[in-house]
Image (tube, rainbow, N blue to C red):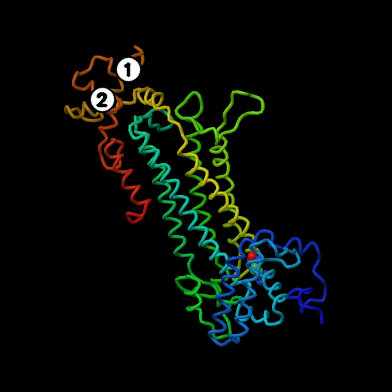
């Protein structure tokens, strides 16, 4: 008999050697190797459960666990050579275990299939990744909150249709992004709640003939419960798709922020400057300083959305239960997680270095008759119905445009004139959620408490 290391673990039923192209095409080891810590953790827990349930002898289990721990160290140190022939991380670990401890290694896969194994590994891996994303979202929010606090009194034009609309506090503008990222955190939190169920014990698809204790094993691995249906457990990738959807939305938010920073750094705006350490120059134009980081993050939002679409498309036609198609989930979700983590880390690092040109912003905040609504509101307070006030001010704006003067240079009620400054306009919006500086300061405090864990999310 050939030694087990030189044959495929599933090879007995086959007459022919696997075609080389097939080996290359089906191998996933070059990307699923990153699951090794979670794969070994799940295997150790599974092995201990098998011994507890007297499915395998205690001594064998101890031997297997010691072997698995050694393999983890070897992989940690990059000492285990990866081989296309061994397909994926599960086969690499099992095959190495055979080398280390001999035939006893063969007992590890009792009551288990690669189908429930890979589903468990991926859930464990993503649970950790989601925690990292939540932490990075927190760091970004804190960076935005520091900047918002620093710039509460800085006014800038608020836009709709990219036309000057009403002046707002820069702190208020930045808080809008803090709110988006807070929702992103909640979404990940929710997704993690649904993800946290354990496939092991489902085996290939129908469950196992051995008296496994799925509840003990779930608890051992930190899962809330075992998955309730074995066929769903091995074929469900909702948790991948939900996380990818949350990731796509994070990137959409970062992309919008990027777009604003790029516009704001453009000389016609000249609202901000990004730190040199986060910009690059041009190979031909010596004067250039380009906002490459926001540009790349805006660009990468496309690829993360692409991965979400790929995952949905991957799953939509699959019959129950496991299908090899599902191996394609990994590169999509790994790249998604890497991209989002990288983008969030860069934003958390870059935001503190943003220079705000507050005088330029303030000057632009008063442009474009930005306080025309305040004038209309003042007329309403004097008894004019709003629609009528809107029309009166509309005519005033037209005449001011013709005379090339500002609103407060027109012949208006003296009592109204002080209401038309940008400061007065901002502070007049003293409503919960509004841009009055008092409200913004309070909103910053509330958000900071949430981010520092002093208040529930
Ligand atoms: N590498 C495979 C995957 O990622 C592991 C599961 C393979 N199962 C199987 N029956 N071929 O999906």
Disc 2 element: helix
Q: Specify whether residue 323 is in view.
A: no
Q: Give the percent coordinates (x, y) of residue 53.
A: 54, 86
Instruction: Examine the image and state in which quarter residue 383 appears.
Output: top left
> Where is residue 38 shown, x and y percent of the image?
57, 66
* Image spot of residue 321 (x, y percent): 60, 71
Q: Which mark is residue 406?
A: 1
Above or below: residue 446 compared with residue 130? above
Task: For label 2, count other residues whose C-alpha is less than 10 Å away and answer few (under 14), some (14-19) or many (20+).
Answer: many
Q: Nearer the viewer, residue 401 or 272?
A: 272
* Farthest residue, direction top: 403
Q: Quadrant of the C terminus?
A: bottom left
- Judge from the rendering whether residue 185 lies leftward or rightward of residue 115; answer left or right: left
Say few, some or many: other residues with alpha carbon within 10 Å of mark 1 (under 14 / 14 to 19 / 20 or more): some
Asked if residue 266 is positioned above or below residue 55 in the image, the reply reads above
Residue 253 percent across, percent down from the top left: 47, 44
Query: Viewed as shown, does residue 342 lie left or right of 285?
Result: left
Name the residue tied to disc 2.
375
Residue 377 visible? yes
* Quadrant in the picture for residue 442: top left
Which quarter holds ligand 1? Answer: bottom right
């Amino acid at each position: 008999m050939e030694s087990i290391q030189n044959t495929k673990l599933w090879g007995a039923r086959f007459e022919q050697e696997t075609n080389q192209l097939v080996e290359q095409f089906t191998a996933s080891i070059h990307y699923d190797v990153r699951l090794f810590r979670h794969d070994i953790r799940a295997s150790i827990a599974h092995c201990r459960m098998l011994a507890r349930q007297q499915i395998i002898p205690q001594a064998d289990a101890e031997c297997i666990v010691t072997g698995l721990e050694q393999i983890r160290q070897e992989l940690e140190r990059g000492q285990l050579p990866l081989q296309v022939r061994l397909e994926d991380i599960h086969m690499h670990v099992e095959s190495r275990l055979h080398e280390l401890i001999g035939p006893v290694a063969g007992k590890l896969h009792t009551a288990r299939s690669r189908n429930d194994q890979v589903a468990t590994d991926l859930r464990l891996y993503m649970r950790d990744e989601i925690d990292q994303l939540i932490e990075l979202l927190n760091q970004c929010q804190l960076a935005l909150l520091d900047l918002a606090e620093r710039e509460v009194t800085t006014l800038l034009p608020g836009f709709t249709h990219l036309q000057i609309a009403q002046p707002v506090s820069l702190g208020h503008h930045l808080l809008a992004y803090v709110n988006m990222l807070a929702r992103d955190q909640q979404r990940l939190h929710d997704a993690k709640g649904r993800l946290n169920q354990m496939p092991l014990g489902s085996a290939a698809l129908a469950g196992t003939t051995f008296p496994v204790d799925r509840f003990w094993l779930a608890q051992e691995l930190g899962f809330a419960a075992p998955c309730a249906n074995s066929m769903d457990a091995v074929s469900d990738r909702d948790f991948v798709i939900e996380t990818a959807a949350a990731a796509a939305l994070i990137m959409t938010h970062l992309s919008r922020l990027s777009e604003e920073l790029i516009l704001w750094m453009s000389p016609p705006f000249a609202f901000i400057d990004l730190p040199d350490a986060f910009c690059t120059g041009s190979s031909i134009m010596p004067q250039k300083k380009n906002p490459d980081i926001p540009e790349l993050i805006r660009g990468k939002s496309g690829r993360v959305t692409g991965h979400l679409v790929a995952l949905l498309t991957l799953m939509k036609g699959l019959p129950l239960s496991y299908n090899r198609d599902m191996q394609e989930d990994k590169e999509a979700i790994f790249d998604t997680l890497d991209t989002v983590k990288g983008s969030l880390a860069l934003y958390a690092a870059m935001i503190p270095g943003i220079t705000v040109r507050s005088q330029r912003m303030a000057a632009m905040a008063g442009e474009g008759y930005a306080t025309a609504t305040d004038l209309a509101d003042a007329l309403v307070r004097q008894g004019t119905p709003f629609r009528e006030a809107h029309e009166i001010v509309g005519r005033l704006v037209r005449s001011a445009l013709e005379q090339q003067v500002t609103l407060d240079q027109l012949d208006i009620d003296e009592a109204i004139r002080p209401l038309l400054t940008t400061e007065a306009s901002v502070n007049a919006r003293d409503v919960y959620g509004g841009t009055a500086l008092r409200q913004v300061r309070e909103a910053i405090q509330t958000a900071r408490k949430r981010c520092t864990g002093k208040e529930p999310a």
